Amino acid sequence: MQLVLEKRAERSNVIALISPLIAIGLTIVTMSILFAILGKNPILALGVYFIDPLTDSYSLQEIAVKATPLVMIAIGLSLCYLANVWNIGAEGQFLIGAVAGSWLAVKTQGTDAGHWVLPAMLLLGAAAGALYALIPAICKVRFGASEILTSLMLVYVADLFLDYLVRGPWRDPAGFNFPTTAEFDPVATVPVLIQGGRLHLGAVIALLVVAAATVLLGRTIKGFEIRVVGAAPRAARFGGFNSDQLILLTFAISGALAGLAGIIEVAGPVGHLQPGISPGYGFTAIIVAFLGRLNPIGILIAGLFLALTFIGGEQAQIAMKIPLDVTKVFQGILLFYVLACDSLILYRFRLVFPTRKVSSGTA
Amino acid sequence: MRKILIAATAVMLAAGASLFSASAADKLKVGFIYLGPIGDLGWTYQHELARQALVKEFGDKIETTYLENVSEGPDSERSIEQLVRAGNKLIFTTSFGYMEPTLKVAKKYPDVHFEHATGYKRDKNMSTYSGRFYEGRYIQGIIAAKMSKSGVLGYIGSFPIPEVISGINATILGAQTINPNIKVKIIWANSWFDPGKEADAAKALLDQGADVIMQHTDSPAAMQIASERGKLAFGQDSEMIKFGPKAQLTSIEDNWAPYYIDRVKAQLDGTWKSEDTWGGLKSKLVVMAPYTNMPDDVKKLAMDTEAAIVDGKLFPFKCPVLGQDGKEIECKGGDHLADGQVLGMNFYVKGIDDTIPGK
Amino acid sequence: MGLLEAIILSVLAASTPLLIAATGELVTERSGVLNLGVEGMMIVGAACGFGGTWLTGSTIIGALCGIGAGVLLSLVFAMMTLGLAVNQVATGLALTILGIGLSGLIGAGFVGERITPAPHLYIPGLTDIPLVGRILFGEDGFIYLSLALVVAVWLFLYRTRAGLVLRAAGDNHVSAHALGYPVLRIRMFAVMFGGGCAGLAGAYLPLAYTPFFIPGMTAGRGWIALALVVFSSWRPGRLVIGAYLFGAVTILQLHAQGLGLGIPSQFMSALPYLATVIVLVLISRARTGGSTAPAALGTVFVPDR
């Protein structure tokens, strides 16, 4: 007697609806066990992680601030993943976008530049991110090189390039040789929406991106092409969709979004360029994309949820001395459960009883 | 169902709130932001030791909280602010990269006091503090020159910032008083903490002929390699002697405890003021680990040098200081380089055959 | 000891974890499964390996702990991707994140402790031969093991029936299944082997390279191992060359600094990654119609009944 996985005749809509809930439920159970093993009160810990950050305006703003780059990058990634190409280099595109936009900020520093500076910086960031993402895309389309590995390797290159710039040519001259540029001028800073908090214009841009992606995927031909190329490549070929062009397009868009997120982050919450401006946003965004099931609204929710766990995790470190690694474990486990539950949408289990084996001709 | 949910939420909120308010009005809450893990045996470990000293000294009067592994990017501002919101009134941010975030939060909360390590921006409620590690480096240079048979020192640097550059220069100046032709090879790990890289760098330095290793990075890897190969090394930050019982000559220990105790006392007394503290051997902010694995005469020389620095009779950067081109550096501090010159040092002294990266 | 000999020894040591992890992943990928979780398995292997040796004083037990940890984590991956037909890329990434978090929790108690590093071989007479003595006869067990592992994998893949079947599963799982081979079971064992190797490679770091545990001590080596597999066109022989090349670039970059060559260190540090990209492009070009990956690599397989 065996438990066997087999493909369903058609998607199960019931499972599609409840699978995220099952996944979250399973995660909470697993995390409670983990908290108990660590000697912490599970109820209290879960409260600090998930409820407390929702109870005051500061934390809510911080959740939005943290979620902004995640959502932006994840939307871009979802386009690639829907087309079945794997952009793993969003982190590098984020950094390159930050560098490109910062170039303008550093160039116009101290001059009485007008308000065109910030929009120009954002455009530069997006353009640079797009170009950087096109490198692995072109390598794949022209040479067949694995985009997973090329995009990943370029992350390290981007990180080292940023390091070189802030330690050398772009160092703040008044900064005692420390590796950071001078603080950006006000015209080069992303404006804050509410005084006293850190919620900034980037959040609005992120929401616009979500809306744009919804329209793109749901209502345009290109969006349709992207989805078909990923789900049914042969049908796409018959339909005359140019998969090479779509690969380049999705990589370019996702690179642009990652680059945009990068410059917004640097010109907003950080305010200057320094090494280590990203705590792994490019990689966390991959989780967000999958948690959101590659759907723009889903990604928005997933991004906010994941940001909540980051903020909650920091508060848990203060309030209950729970190590920050627990947040990573939580995110990994959540993703596992979501992926596992989602597989039940397309597949199901069946008990199979042994039948008499027919001996095959080959020994 | 909804009522149960609301009730449950209320219970959790109350529990969470009670967690915060339990430690209410009486105790002074002191917070710490750490760059690395407390077990790094290096930079963060020393701050953690000082925090534990605080707990020991003040007992029930204070309550300390720390956040470790806080990256220096946008998250740090939030972490600092969260400490403030959790009721901490005196907060130590222990790395240069926290400078701008600390400043931003300080501006927001004028009644909270901040202590920023190794930075240079201050405010009415934000102090800075650091150690004159270069004094220890000078002594190490003397010891190294005495103990080196090959006349080549190996230096593992982290980043080419003034603190590290002044350390290298002080080492060479000290070494040159014993051996004017001393040579140094410098490798940059581009990280404060990367055991694999530090180990590889130590091997490369030893392979290229250095026989005394010094480091401005935070892991015991280099000490371990030196020990394996029967060579000598200086530890960093805390006593790495257990990784090299026969290899460690001494170590520069950051002794933050007296400073932290002073500041907490001032906070408790209400006399806290924003200051800039740059203490060295004299104020015991910098402490040399016991001198080991060296003959008695070298030990005596080291201790004498230490005493001379403490008494103000000896300055590592005594003028004239010659730059790499042999020309004298302008002397702005009377008979030794001024503090500002050391804080912003971005040149090598004569005798170092290398270029500072990024110049 | 001459400079050349010393450099070769350093390169050997630096390349070994890459070689071991990449060999395991090569087998996994040859069977048709892409496991991106190598970094996560390696770092858990490092934590458990260190723990094992610290508790018992024995390097071998530590190595076994590392292997065991890697195998366990890879089983989770296998259950998801083979049992539940979940997307392999996403699962691998989740595994990496989970592994990094787990290793931090497991290893938290070990930070600051030290162990005795793995013993080096010493054969009187042989080890003292100048230039090659220490390289051939004076290294620690892991280095010899890594080379033996590569040879064993090569023999298995190309000289045994089981290896042929494994390669078939990776190239065309539908046909393999039609011929009656248990594709899923083959892949599961391949994934477990990959996990064990990753765990062993991770354990090598605290057991032999730097004898203490630091969170995050793998520093991205798992990702480089993944790149190595592609770099080597999925051939064990080329894997050795690739691993030593990578190790060499890492070590030589440091030596260049020590010698005072004025190249920016960040550029030197970036070389291995740039080199991988260039090589990936070159080898993909060389083949007509793309790379020589196992044709079924990364695709989901659900046997029909």
Image (cartoon, coloured by chain):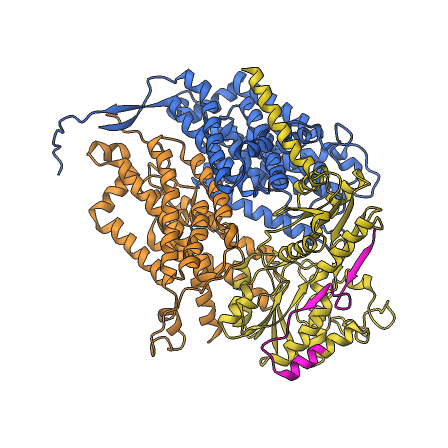
Chain colours: A blue, B yellow, C orange
The location of residue A29, given as percent across then percent down, is 47, 31
| Numbered range of the magenta stretch | B274-303
The location of residue C275, given as percent across then percent down, is 49, 52
For the point 75% across and 53% down, which residue is it?
B119
Relative side of A187 to B233, left or right: right
Instruction: Say if C202 sits above or below A15 in the image.
Output: below
Relative side of B333 to A147, left or right: right
- Taking the magenta stretch, the answer to whether it contains residue B292 is yes
- Taking the magenta stretch, the answer to whether it contains residue B178 is no
What is the quadrant of residue A204 in the picture?
top right
- Between A148 and B233, which is closer to the camera in this rendering? B233
Q: Is residue C143 visible?
A: yes
What is the quadrant of residue C262 in the picture?
bottom right
For the point 35% across and 38% down, which residue is it?
C78
- Between A145 and C113, which is closer to the camera in this rendering? C113
The location of residue A151, given as percent across then percent down, is 51, 41
Q: Quadrant of the C terminus of chain B?
A: bottom right
Instruction: Say if A308 sits above or below B239 in the image.
Output: above
- Between A336 and A155, which is closer to the camera in this rendering? A336
